[in-house]
Image (cartoon, helix red, strand yellow):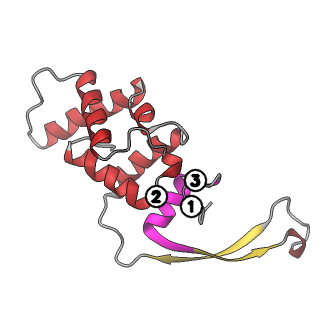
Amino acid sequence: WLTARPGENLYCRLSVNTQLLARVQQLMKVGKNNFRPPPKVDSRVVRIEPRNPPPPVNFVEWDGMVRLCFNRKNKTLRSVFTTKSVLNLLEKNFRTYHALKNLPLPETFNTNTVKIIVEETLDSVEMSTTRSSKLDVDDFLVLLDAFNKRNIRFS
């Protein structure tokens, strides 16, 4: 999981978060016969080197977005971000962010407004039809930056 790459079956939120914060390298496989009693799974030895300095990203925001993306990793991002529950969450976060920053809300602001902003944002980075399971760390960073520039927040 830690070393899984985009498109691989084991690629998940853990893979993305680990690879954001560290360089991960598989060193060797360890067979189950090396343990007593033998486990039902194979093991691996990995090297995890923290990135220094860590990437300049708000990890709470990052993890909020990645969590949503990987709830259904094989759906398109448009499908993930335009479900009713996600739009309601993003609308609530949008209102909270604007209140904290003393920014005015658009006059006719509602869930549909958030949906339009989300769709425009996904189109602007050409990721509407992309699936989370195919995105690498850099793609997720681009996506988070695009959402944050439109005041879409995930925490």
Report which residue position mark 3 lands on.
7
Q: Does the magenta stretch include residue 12?
A: yes
Residue 7 image position (x, y, % from top left): 58, 53
Q: Are marks 1 and 3 in contact (CB under 8 Å)?
A: yes
Secondary element under disc 2, as helix, strand or loop, is loop
Q: Give the range drawn in magenta.
A: 10-24
First along the sequence among labels 2 and 1 = 1
Q: Which residue is drawn at 28% across and 31% down?
A: 92
Q: Mark 2 points at which residue?
A: 136
| 141 relative to 48, above or below | above
Kind of element beneath mark 1: loop
Q: Where is residue 71 in the image (x, y as percent from the top left)?
A: 52, 39
Q: Which of marks 3 and 2 is nearer the N terminus?
A: 3
CA separation, marks 1 and 3?
Answer: 6 Å
From the image, tell me which residue sits under label 1.
5
- For the residue marked with disc 1, what is the amino acid? Arg
Q: In this view, does 64 lie to the left or right of 115?
A: right
**CA separation in Å, label 3 and label 2:** 9 Å
| Mark 2 nearby-residue class (10 Å; few <14, some 14–19, many ≥20) | some
* Left or right placement of residue 58 versus residue 42 in this view: left
